[in-house]
Amino acid sequence: MITHFADWLTYSILKLEENSHLAESVSFFVNDTIKIVLLLILVTHFMGWLRYHLPTSKIRNFLAEKKLFGLEYFFATIFGAVTPFCSCSSIPLFVGFIRAGIPLGVTLSFLITSPLINEVALVLFWTLFGWEVTLLYLVSGLSIGMAGGWILQKMNLEDQVEEFLTKPQCSCSKKKEEAALEKKEPGMWHNISREAFSITRKILPYLLIGIGIGAIIHGFVPEGYFEQFLTQNVWWTVPLAVLLAVPLYANASAVIPIIDSLVLKGVPLGTALAFMMAVVGLSFPEALILKRVMKMKLLLSFFGVVTLGIIVLGFLFNVLF
């Protein structure tokens, strides 16, 4: 239905020449925009309802428990996956978790997973690549978060967190923080819908830019063009894709349509996926903000572990797909 509407708008209303580069780009843009925006609205409403019943302070207290037998890393990554945050907006929660006394490795598991996996990215992945690839992407992203957090915990880097985060808070400020986290205004569905549309508005401009770039690639770039530069048989293309992504910064939702177009043009899925995950999880803005709360040894260790995990994931996807 959406595809028919996109073709009708492209050829009957805009009267673009059939099979031309511009027509293919416009049809791709209209089709993906409608499909992704509708899914975005539905998913953000559902996840808003879920988060409404999972208050941050209760999750924080749960993760601070001492008898979870290693499962705290898993729960931290799950919480990271259901929070609609980019890398930079995850940092305030990271600060709150450190102040609450949650182990550093568990907190870093959340910080690693939060930008890499979210409900919108999963829905887009499922729509564009199918459930098998989406499930493997989910499991792989959670694995990077759990393994990364565990490794960093074993490195005993607690002294590399800036001192002001580990100083005891006065009781009045702690009460204010907890009250702010638990505050819920009347009208649950009104608040959920307001939050969902707020997230949608924030994501939408970047999403449209991403879809637009993907549409240009889809319509104007010849088949196999990128394959000559990023082939599966050259081992260094995955690390290169990760390095090229570091100066960039975007939400996963904006990058996935571009990745879809690159894959359609011949770039191996693992190489494209490594590029996407590096864009959202290894950015300069994130590093600059984290420098305020981490000392250099912890900062370099954090980015090193995440980089290694993304590269391994890229190789894995290239082997399997």
Image (spheres, helix red, strand yellow):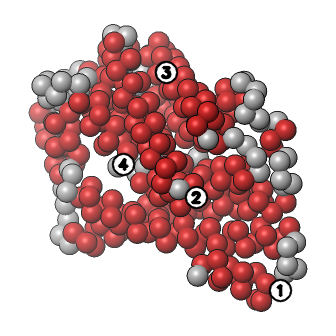
x, y (%) of residue 132? 49, 50
Q: Where is mark 4, residue-wise?
A: 83
Residue mark closest to the camera, 3 vs 2: 2
Q: Is residue 275 left or right of residue 138?
A: right
Please state if 309 lies on the left or on the right of 258 as rendered.
left
- Looking at the rendered structure, the secondary structure element under dot 3 is helix
Residue 244 in view: no
**Neighbourhood count class around disc 1 (C-alpha, 10 Å): few under 14, some 14–19, many 20 upward:** few
Total marks shown come to 4
Distance (Cα) linking label 3 and label 2: 29 Å
What's under tag 2, amino acid-wise?
Leu
Tag 3: Cα neighbours inside 10 Å, few (<14), some, or many (≥20)?
A: some
Q: Specify the label residue 305 is tagged with.
A: 3
* Circle 2: element type: helix
- Residue for badge 1: 15
Q: Quadrant of the N terminus?
A: bottom right
Q: Secondary structure at mark 4?
A: loop
Q: Nearer the viewer, mark 4 or mark 2?
A: 2
Q: Is residue 305 or residue 234 the one in the foreground?
A: 234
- In the picture, measured across the screen, residue 78 lies left or right of residue 228, that is left
Task: Give the mark, 3 or 1, whose residue is nearer the N terminus.
Answer: 1
Q: Earlier in the sequence, mark 2 or mark 1?
A: 1
Label 4: how many Cα within 10 Å (few below 14, some 14–19, many 20+)? many
Which of these two is toward me, 198 or 156?
A: 156
Q: Residue at x 42, y 39 (%)?
A: 139
Q: Earlier in the sequence, mark 3 or mark 4?
A: 4
Q: What residue sits right under mark 2 in the picture?
A: 128
